Amino acid sequence: MARTRAYKSDVKAAIHETAQDLHKAGLIEKHTMRRFDESCLTPIKTFTADEIRALREREQVSQTVFAMYLNVTKDSVSQWERGDKRPAGPACKLLSIVAEKGLSAIA
Amino acid sequence: MARTRAYKSDVKAAIHETAQDLHKAGLIEKHTMRRFDESCLTPIKTFTADEIRALREREQVSQTVFAMYLNVTKDSVSQWERGDKRPAGPACKLLSIVAEKGLSAIA
DNA sequence: CAATATGTAGAACCTGGTTCTATATTTCAA
DNA sequence: TTGAAATATAGAACCAGGTTCTACATATTG
């Protein structure tokens, strides 16, 4: 292992690193390592308008500040929360991270 | 402070939490807190095709696995690396996080 | 009061992200 | 060695996400 971590939330990261090191050492095959990657990825949620709003309010920030964290415009956040538009792939990933680890995880 | 962290990379998160707590305590105004948020956000890079490829290869994963982490299709990653398309706002945010903290930060 | 922050609303535009197929090369297990 | 699977390129077509703009309404604050 290249690094060790104290937090249990980083178990998945550790699994990935372990698999990578095992691969480098020639102990496991590439396709096996990919299975590790698949299994240790956090599942992506599909957020409703209300869930997005609740998430933002949980973090106690305005739409503008929330948008800054996600690197989108404030209008986009507003549209998400009104159900006008729905966040795409990368946006959902960021929202999932925030939902699980809080805004500070993507500061 | 609600939590304390040991790593210096979380200084910005700490600033945010501190500002938030100061606001709750009525010691600073909302607009002042927003300035804190602005200043503690990691600047977003604009990635060239080559930089994206270099970033992925640094993490030693295939386009497919890289795509899984970012919650986009493998085709999108391929298009980025060939300069066919360019990552949008949320995608750039994710790439910036990976560039700074590694793939495990968005596992 | 005046200025700022916050959020809604809607329209128009552009391009990112998806999906599909086809091709070529490499990797690895049987 | 053979064949399946992984990897990556290429291009086309489509949809909708994200942006930008304006206008309006309501707090909030100095």
Image: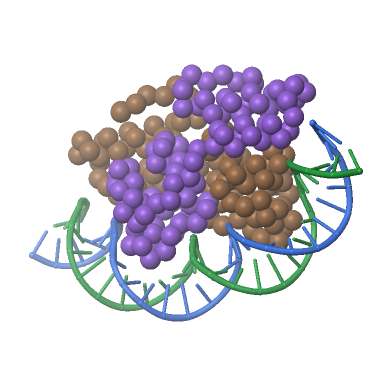
Chain colours: A brown, B purple, C green, D blue
Q: Quadrant of the C terminus of chain A?
A: top right
Residue A68 at what x, y percent from top left? 60, 44
**Within the image, what quadrant is residue A80 found in?**
bottom right
Q: Quadrant of residue B24?
A: top right
Q: Residue at position x 30%, y 28% from top? A: A2
User: Along the line of sight, which residue is nearer the eye, A51 or B10?
Assistant: B10
Q: Residue at x 34, y 46 (%)?
A: B55
Q: Check the picture and name the quadrant holding the N terminus of chain A.
A: top left
Q: Residue at x 62, y 31 (%)?
A: B36
Left or right of A90 in this view: A84: right
Judge whether residue A59 can be spotted in this image: no
Residue at 70% of width from left, 53% of height from top? Answer: A78
Q: Quadrant of residue A27?
A: top left
Nearer the observer, B107 or A30: B107
In-image side of B11 versus B86 (left or right): right
Q: Position of residue D12 (x, y in %)?
A: 41, 80
